[in-house]
């Protein structure tokens, strides 16, 4: 009995240790690209500002893209996926077809 209790405690300890390290690695960070692409924020800002200057509604359209991407299964970029021969992407899914816009800015 004591042996199985000890085994259970050790197993739970490893589970907690593993889950803790996994969730720490999975967290987003605002400085994730600081070393690999230090100009990312400036580049994105310039592209978005240019798109909004050309068409004022684009800012709202981009915000709507993020909302629809994050609403169902979290912010995973799935709304940006194109169709393939074996997969129907969210860009052309019924609710988004001719509704979601701003993909050209993101691309």
Image (cartoon, grey):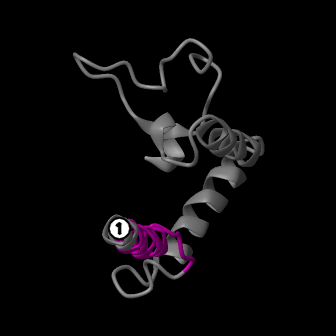
Q: Residue 100's x, y, as percent?
A: 62, 28
Q: Nearer the viewer, residue 41 or 95?
A: 95
Question: x, y (%) of residue 52?
Answer: 70, 52
> Left or right of 87: which side holds 104?
right
Per the image, label 1 sits on a secondary structure element best described as helix
Question: Is 2 positioned to the left or the right of 29 in the image?
Answer: left
Q: Depth check: 19 or 61 in front?
A: 19
Q: Residue at x 48, y 19 (%)?
A: 92
Above or below 73: residue 23: below
Q: Residue at x 53, y 47 (%)?
A: 105
The residue carrying mark 1 is 11
Q: Percent position (x, y) of residue 90?
A: 48, 26
Q: Is residue 68 above or below residue 60?
A: above
Using a 10 Å C-alpha cutoff, classify the residue at mark 1 as few (fewer than 14 neighbours), some (14 to 19) or many (20 or more).
Answer: few
Q: Position of residue 68 (x, y in %)?
A: 65, 35
Q: Residue at x 51, y 69 (%)?
A: 27
Location of the N terminus (image quadrant): bottom left
- Vertical placement of residue 101 versus 23, above or below: above
Q: Camera-side residue: 36 or 32? A: 32
Residue 11 belongs to the span the image colors magenta: yes
What's drawn in magenta, residue-wise? 8-30
Residue 1 lies in the magenta-colored region: no
Residue at the left extreme of this rendering = 85
Note whether 5 is above or below 30 in the view shown: above
Q: Would you identify the image quadrant in which residue 82 lies?
A: top left
């Amino acid at each position: 009995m004591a042996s199985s209790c000890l085994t259970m405690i050790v197993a739970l300890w490893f589970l907690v240790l593993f889950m803790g390290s996994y969730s720490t690695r999975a967290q987003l960070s605002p400085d994730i690209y600081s070393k690999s692409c230090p100009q990312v924020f400036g580049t994105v800002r310039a592209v978005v500002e240019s798109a909004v200057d050309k068409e004022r509604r684009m800012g709202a359209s981009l915000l709507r893209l993020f909302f629809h991407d994050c609403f169902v299964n979290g912010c995973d970029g799935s709304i940006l996926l194109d169709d393939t021969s074996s997969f129907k992407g969210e860009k052309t899914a019924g609710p988004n077809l001719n509704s979601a816009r701003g993909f050209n800015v993101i691309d």
